[in-house]
Image (spheres, rainbow, N blue to C red):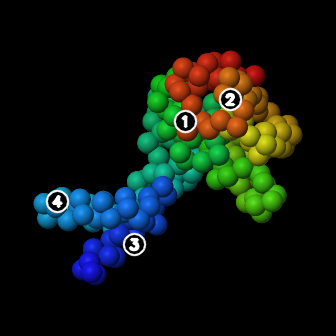
Amino acid sequence: MLPQPLKNLIEHFSKLPGIGQRTATRLAFFLLNQPPDDLKDFAQALMELKTKTKVCQNCFNLSSETLCAICSDKKRNPLIICVVEDILDIIPLERTKQFGGLYHVLGGLISPTEGLTPDKLKIKELIARIKKHPEQVEIILAFNPTVEGDATALYLERILKTTNAKVSRLARGLSAGGDLEYTDEATLINALKNRK
Ligand SMILES: [Zn+2]
């Protein structure tokens, strides 16, 4: 009964995480009532999402250039590298405004059951970054306190012994099984300060 373009849009929305058929329908009808220019901007943003988004060649954060805004910021200390599971973990850490180093996005955590072995993560690249500096680099492992997070931290602590890096972990204060992405700022600031 609905026109095909509306049906198409509902189908796309219902594929998004957390969006059911009802919400998808509401969103589609909402858009139908928006001014054509707004819809054009929206479509443009969608088109450019892939074509104009790159991955930073240094830290694997998202970027619109070869280096991301954080890596190209001269005020940040390249000798402190905070290692995170994925790009979304950078957002809460940046929000604390307490971290002046750079990041390294691993692209996952070690999880043999999901086929995520160390060679699938950006570990070689991390070691190369550490070795690029003659000075000692400080590595802060900032993973969610889960089984995979702990396993990955232990693995990295072991493998980074082959470098002269000083390795610390974000202090517990983060609840077990908790998610960095949803941790409040005060807890994160404490976890950063009390790293060990
Ligand atoms: Zn970067």
Separation of marks 4 and 3 at Cα, in angstroms: 19 Å
Residue kind at label 3, given as amino acid type: Glu
Separation of marks 1 and 3 at Cα, in angstroms: 29 Å
Q: Nearer the viewer, residue 56 or 18?
A: 18
Q: Residue furthest front?
A: 1
Q: Is residue 161 above or below residue 68?
A: above
Residue 55 in the image, given as x and y percentages of width and height = 51, 56
Question: Which is more N-terminal, label 1 or label 2?
Answer: 2
Mark 4 residue element: loop
Mark 1 residue element: helix
Mark 3 residue element: helix
Which mark, residue 11? 3
| Residue at image mark 2 | 175
Question: Which is more N-terminal, label 2 or label 3?
Answer: 3
* Number of residues whose C-alpha sits closer than 10 Å to that of mark 3, classed few (under 14), some (14–19) or many (20 or more): some
Note whether ligand 1 is within 8 Å of mark 3. Answer: no
Separation of marks 2 and 1 at Cα, in angstroms: 11 Å
| Residue drawn at (57%, 31%) of the image | 183
Residue 151 in the image, given as x and y percentages of width and height = 81, 43
108 sits to left or right of 103:
right
